[in-house]
Amino acid sequence: MSRKFTTALSLSFLLHAVLAAVLIMGNFDHTPKPPPKVVQVQTIQATIVDKSKIEAQINKIKKKKLDDARELRELEQQVAYARKKRAKEERRIKALERQRKKKEIEKIAADSAAKKARTKANAAEKLRAQKEKEQKIAENAAADAKAKRLKEEKAAKKADDLLKKKAAERKRKEREAKERAKQQKLLEQQMAEEMAIRQKARNKQTMSEIGRFNALIKQTIQGRLITDRSTMEGKSCKLTISLAPSGFVTNVVIGKGDRVVCNAAKTAIYKAGTLPVSKDPEVFKEMRTISLTVVPEF
């Protein structure tokens, strides 16, 4: 709302207030109270004069009020016109803004399309350059491969000649090695046969020695065995004896057999303390741990 409209509205309110005050304070009754006779004519005259002034003032106020109302209507029309004009301007601005945004979107789309086109063109150029580079590399590689192949063929021929020469030499050496192996095998067979004969004889001698010493050990045990025909006759006990190289008894393990015979045999062995053993290391190795069966003799 403009300053001019505000001023007119304030003036209208002021005039209405003045008119209300005049109407309240004035006396328009045509039948006033009878004044004293001395001053009656003068009072009536004064009342008529005041009434005419008031009516003139009222008419002036009414005219002013009409003028203010007309001015107010004009101002209201101006305000309505201004509002319509402003609304129209706002619509125009909005239309321009929509158009601007549309142009902006079109520009962004155009820029994006141009960027894509440039990217595509750059990619195509890079691809062309890459293909050209790859073709050059392939040509160089083909030339290198050809030179390498010729070199390898030459080296292969040389290697093949050398291989044939080595193969012939290897065959000759293999024939010689087979002949030497054959001779060595024959020699080893002869030596093995001789060793077998010797070992057989040695084993026979060892077993004979072991048998002899087993008999001596049994004889020693029998010599120290306390017997009782009523409890031991027809009974036996199997023992396992561990010996030191000197013949000293280190352990006795009772196996199957009669308990009385076993206990008596174990006591007899420990009573002897040392049993007969061979001084030959190979024979003693076989009898370090001996198993024998004790049968009481009566």
Image (cartoon, helix red, strand yellow):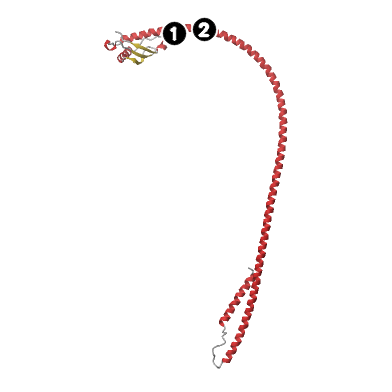
Q: Amino acid at mark 2?
A: Met
Q: Please report the residue visible at 64 percent of the width from the left and 76 percent of the height from the top.
A: 66
Rendering coords of residue 7 (x, y %):
63, 72
Q: Give the vertical position of 221 relative to 78 (above or below).
A: above
Residue drawn at x 58%, y 91% as measured from the top left: 42
Q: Local crowd at mark 2 within 10 Å, few (<14), some, or many (≥20)?
A: few
Mark sitting on residue 290: none
Q: Quadrant of residue 84?
A: bottom right
Asked whether, in this view, residue 226 is left or right of residue 29, the answer is: left
The quadrant of the image that shows the C terminus is: top left
**Which residue has dot 2 on it?**
191
Pinpoint residue 58: horizontal percent, then vertical percent.
Answer: 61, 81
Judge from the rendering whether residue 35 lies leftward or rightward of residue 240; answer left or right: right
SS for dot 2: helix
Residue 183 picture location, percent across and down: 57, 8
Q: Amino acid at mark 1?
A: Asn
105 over 295 or under it: above or below = below
> Which residue in the protein does label 1 denote?
203
